[in-house]
Amino acid sequence: MPLLADLHNHSCLSPCGSLELSPRRLAEIASARNVKALALTDHNSSLNCPAFAKVCPEYGIIPIFGMEAATSEEIHVLCLFTGLRESLAFSEYAYSVLLPFPNDPEKTGDQVYVDENDNIEGEVEYYLVNPLAISIDDIGTKVAEYGGIVIPAHIDRSAF
């Protein structure tokens, strides 16, 4: 029997996502569509993955933890990890090398992380779509150090 998986999803943490798109809501939508494995891949952060880890089992979904990283060349790649701890550790690294440009929610959107009940726990200060100070040549090695793999994102587009 085939397993339906979706590996590229943004939540309310990504400025392109809506506030209504919590980890719980993503799991609800995926469950309704018979998705059995779901990755949470917000822009340059895994801060919503702890809530995602708690809600996915309620819907019979296998959670996959990661992020969509933007390299210094602004090439977007999915970074998927073996577990929550590894994803959060890489997320800390990514934030340390993120271009420190403040987010302006009025212009670029909110960047909130939530708990498993959709309560806002905090907001990320820097704009998460900015590139990281790591090249496309080096990101695969760095992600592997944290137990992850890299998959190109947006291969059907001329940019990103």
Image (cartoon, grey):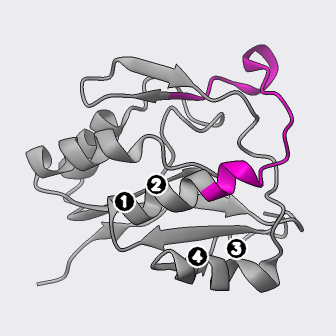
> Quadrant location of residue 36?
bottom left
In the image, 29 versus 22, the foreground residue is 22
Q: CA distance from mark 2 to mark 1?
A: 5 Å
- The kind of residue on which mark 2 rests is Leu
Q: Please check the rendered image and state whether residue 97 is part of the magenta-colored stretch, yes or no.
A: yes
Left-right relation of 38 to 98? left
- Above or below, 120 relative to 4: above
Q: Please name the residue shown 56% across and 54% down the image.
A: 91
Circle nearer the viewer, 2 or 3: 2
| Element marked by disc 4 | helix
Q: Can see residue 66?
A: no
Q: Which residue is mark 1?
A: 85
Q: Please name the residue shown 54% across and 83% down the image.
A: 144
Q: Position of residue 117 (x, y in %)?
A: 24, 23
Instruction: Report the magenta residues as a range.
Output: 93-112
Q: Dots 3 and 1: beta carbons under 8 Å?
A: no
Q: Which residue is mark 2?
A: 88
Q: Dots 2 and 1: beta carbons under 8 Å?
A: yes
Q: Position of residue 45 (x, y in %)?
A: 57, 48
Q: Earlier in the sequence, mark 2 or mark 4?
A: 2
| Element marked by disc 3 | loop
Q: CA distance from mark 2 to mark 3?
A: 28 Å
| Element marked by disc 2 | helix
| Element marked by disc 1 | helix
Left-right relation of 134 to 56? right
- Above or below, 63 relative to 53: below
**The C terminus lies in quadrant:** bottom right
Q: Which residue is mark 4?
A: 143
Q: Which mark is on residue 156?
A: 3
